[in-house]
């Protein structure tokens, strides 16, 4: 029992992670009591929040720091899976309902303010969003940047937070029918955005997979967490995860948008009746 | 003046990985191979080469230790300002006596074995992001995983360089000479 508990203790405590997760959980719980979201919304929200917490604030983090392919799994959850589920649960109205009145007013005022609107206009531009999403994956995987991020704990945290926040932004933009900050993107544009992030991930994943030399020696230098996996094998598994699974999330996203918005309502209803 | 000097020196890049500013200053509390309680302060004034290993390791550790001893010898007089810290990842078996006998094979004067409580060793490996899992149940002694990093600290305990087995002895020696030169502006023992 003690052993099992040990796995859930943080490898490196982070007040930011505790406060962020705790705040989100409390707001959502309070919001549930007031606005009664649907069961699937709750399921998606807790799955998303729990997955992000588990990969970043448990002993799992030790393995992410010491094994390239586990680092890739961590980022798959932080950048894709976790934000994807969080966005699917459309948690904004529940979270706002969970806030004290003044907090809710403050959030609305910030959202309506000029600087926020301008920033949103730039970040929600489809080209910017796609570039940022793919660029961030590529940036942290540049060998020299990756080396420094893995050795410096401050950069390591910045890397993980930037991935998570960018994931929330991107999936929030493409999965939500909107409007977001008075901005409405057509389902076609949003599908195109999800398709546009596939090729960069395939290219980066394949480059890592087919590399014949060790691109990320930091794991050999500081030691790997799992014995018996060679440097190249570790690198290849990591490459595959980015290549296949990263792109797969786009495919699922496209299907969701098609089903939610493009299939005529009548067809869905007759399907359910049938 | 000092800025001008450091500015000139930093223009030329090091042969091995430079990590200044990315890893924290040296800090530990362990038992040395002479049985004394030692801390980072004990070795202030020396340029330190820190390596994690265990005496039962038959592959990487002896090779790395022999190499470090050789590189230190290449430095001539400068060698007296160097200390090689061999931190045991197997404190159960590596008692101070065992460690003393082990490190003396490589350099009885400048190599020092360090051991201690598992939590203290874990804290040190964690500080320098080195793989070590004493409590997971995975990786019993024979399978202790460890990297081949040599953490190099200046005479004030600041992490400066990270050398690996991929760096040649001559390159490492050159960098250490340069570090000695910079350190002589500070306080060398």
Image (tube, coloured by chain):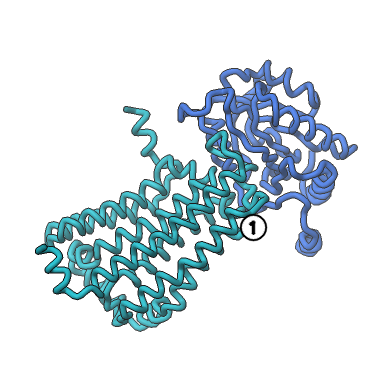
Chain colours: A cyan, B blue
> Can residue B180 be seen here?
no
Quarter of the figure that contains the N terminus of chain B = bottom right
Q: Residue furthest left?
A: A273
Choose between A52 and A107: the one closer to the eye: A52
Residue picked out by circle 1: A144
Q: Residue at left 40%, top 42%? A: A58
Choose between A182 and A264: the one closer to the eye: A264
Indicate the position of residue B62 as horizontal and vertical percent values.
73, 27
The reply, left or right, for residue B39 in relation to residue A270 is: right
> Can residue B95 be seen here?
yes
Indicate the position of residue B63 as horizontal and vertical percent values.
75, 30
Choose between B94 and A43: the one closer to the eye: A43
Q: What element carries label 1?
A: helix
Q: Determine the image quadrant of residue A77.
A: bottom left
Q: Residue at left 79%, top 34%? A: B67
Indicate the position of residue B96 as horizontal and vertical percent values.
65, 19
Quarter of the figure that contains the C terminus of chain B = top right
Q: Determine the image quadrant of residue B125.
A: top right
Label 1: how many Cα within 10 Å (few below 14, some 14–19, many 20+): some
Q: Residue at left 82%, top 50%? A: B178
């Amino acid at each position: 029992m003690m052993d099992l508990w040990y796995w859930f203790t943080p490898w490196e405590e982070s007040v930011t992670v505790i406060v962020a997760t705790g705040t989100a959980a409390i707001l959502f719980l309070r919001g549930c009591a007031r606005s009664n979201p649907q069961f699937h919304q709750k399921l998606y929200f807790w799955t998303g929040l729990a997955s992000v917490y588990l990969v970043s604030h448990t002993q799992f983090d030790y393995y992410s720091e010491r094994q390239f392919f586990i680092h890739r799994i961590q980022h798959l959850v932080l950048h894709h899976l976790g934000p994807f589920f969080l966005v699917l649960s459309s948690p904004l109205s529940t979270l706002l309902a969970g806030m004290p009145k003044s907090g809710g007013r403050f959030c609305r005022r910030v959202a309506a303010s000029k600087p926020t609107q301008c920033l949103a206009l730039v970040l929600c531009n489809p080209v910017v969003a796609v570039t940022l999403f793919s660029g961030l994956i590529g940036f942290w995987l540049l060998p020299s940047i990756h080396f420094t991020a893995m050795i410096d704990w401050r950069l390591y945290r910045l890397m993980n937070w930037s991935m998570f926040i960018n994931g929330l932004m991107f999936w929030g933009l493409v999965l939500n029918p909107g409007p977001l900050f008075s901005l409405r993107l057509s389902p076609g544009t949003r599908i195109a955005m999800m398709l546009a992030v596939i090729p960069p991930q395939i290219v980066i994943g394949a480059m890592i997979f087919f590399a014949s030399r060790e691109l990320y020696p930091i794991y050999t230098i500081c030691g790997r967490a799992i014995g018996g996996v060679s440097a190249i094998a570790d690198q290849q598994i990591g490459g595959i995860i980015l290549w296949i699974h990263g792109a797969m999330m786009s495919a699922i996203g496209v299907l969701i948008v098609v089903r939610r918005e493009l299939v005529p309502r009548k067809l869905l209803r007759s399907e359910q009746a049938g | 003046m000092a800025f001008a000097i450091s500015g000139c020196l930093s223009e030329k890049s090091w042969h091995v990985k430079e990590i200044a500013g990315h890893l924290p200053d040296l800090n530990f509390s362990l038992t040395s191979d002479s049985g004394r309680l030692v801390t980072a302060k004990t070795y202030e004034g020396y340029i330190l080469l820190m390596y994690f290993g265990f005496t039962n390791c038959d592959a990487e550790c002896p090779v790395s230790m022999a190499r470090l001893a050789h590189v230190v010898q290449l430095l001539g007089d400068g060698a007296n300002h160097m200390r090689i810290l061999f931190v045991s990842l197997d404190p159960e078996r590596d008692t101070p006596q065992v460690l003393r006998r082990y490190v003396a094979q490589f350099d009885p004067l400048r190599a020092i074995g360090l051991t201690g409580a598992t939590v203290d060793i874990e804290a040190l490996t964690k500080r320098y992001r080195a793989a070590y899992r004493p409590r997971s149940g995975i990786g019993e002694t024979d399978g202790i995983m460890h990297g081949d990093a040599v953490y190099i600290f200046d005479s004030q305990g600041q992490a400066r360089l990270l050398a690996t087995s991929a760096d040649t002895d001559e390159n490492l020696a050159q960098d250490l000479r340069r570090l000695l030169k910079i350190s002589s502006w500070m306080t060398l023992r």
